[in-house]
Image: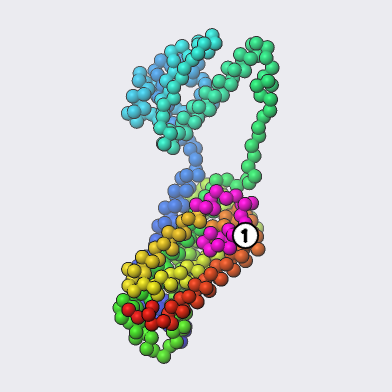
Amino acid sequence: MLLNIYLKELKDSFRDRRTLLLTVLLPIFMMSGLVFFYENMVSGDEGESYSLAVDSSISEDITNIFAGYETIEFVKSSDPEKTLEDGEALAALIVSPEFISSIEEGKEANITLIGDSFSQKSSNLMNAVTTALTSYEKQVTAERLEAQGTDLSLIEPFSITQEEMSDDDTSMFLLAFLVPLILAISIGVGTGPSAADLFAGEKEKKTMEALLMTPVKRSTLLLAKWLTIATVGMLTGIVTLIVLAVEISLFTENLKSAVSFGENVYLVIGIALLLTIVYAVFVASLQMITSIIGKTVKEAQSYSAPIMMLAAFPGMIITNVGLNELSFHHFAIPILNLFSQFKELFMGVIDYQHIFLTFGSNLLFMLVIFIIGRILFLKDKWVMN
């Protein structure tokens, strides 16, 4: 009886165009957009040049300061500031007429850099110009000290070498944030319509009373409906992961080069699929509660909206947490542990204690929420409209 009800509800769910749209098409569009967005973000500025407006009378000695910066392209103009305002350059460099001669004579020399720090490209150009000028400033200082017979070690008593603890690049960190975020949102959005129709929809259509009059136990009916929501969530999550894998492998270069799990590739994929399934059944329980409480489909959807919004907050928290800083609570709190576990997986870390803790906490919370839903479903107050 349970299987028959489950198959019937599942078939009805996929007859609904909204469910099909949110389960299959939405993850494809969402994942495609974000994959290409992040690919463009991590691709850097390779081959891109930045236009810097300078005075048309600028000397070759000044342009030689930027000789090692191939990304800087000079736009000579009689009024560099106006050229910048007209959008023909990303920044403007205004140099005093006797800049080089003033430096050689030990006099004060002025240089002004104008740009928009809120613009990514303009900010990159300003940083490059500032770096070049700082390097030139150090060179001039060193030459003056040597001319006076001063040892350069007096102004540079030590050197600083900075090394990253992890060899993983930005692409891997972005994937560790991207995958669980889209997975959580897509599962929440995909299960929403089915959950709302299976309980609140039945009450709104006045068919719940007829279902309860059948000789089927309420617990069996509840379990069948919950399994339907969970199945929709699992399919949504799996479709999301498949779209991600296909698009990264076929349409990206930087993200593809970042994904390399070596001998653990199949183990990582298996854990990711199990994690998706466990998270889907957890979300199914939450969606079931909101649908039982809601009297109409619209009301149930209003209750379920915070669940989808809630998925974005753990991603913001975990982004600034280092891999070695992850502790017990990061894997014990549902939703947060989804981001924490995927972060470990993408960094090539497979900690079975953390994996079992993640699975166990999600299943425990799912069981508690399911029991609460069962208690509510056994009361006519919540199932009768």
Quadrant of the rendered image containing residue 68: top right
Q: Secondary structure at mark 1?
A: helix
Left-right relation of 379 to 349: left
The residue under the point 48% across, 36% down is 47
Residue extending furthest toward the bottom: 215
How far across and down, in percent of the image, does residue 48 sit?
46, 35
How far across and down, in percent of the image, does residue 62 sit?
49, 18
Residue nearest the viewer, comparing 277 with 253: 277
Left-right relation of 237 to 263: left
The residue under the point 41% across, 64% down is 189
Magenta-tinted stretch: 316-337
Is 335 within the magenta? yes
Residue nearest the viewer, comparing 309 with 173: 309
How far across and down, in percent of the image, does residue 362 sit?
55, 67
How far across and down, in percent of the image, does residue 251 sit?
47, 51
The residue under the point 52% across, 23% down is 133
On the question of residue 6 being in view, the answer is no
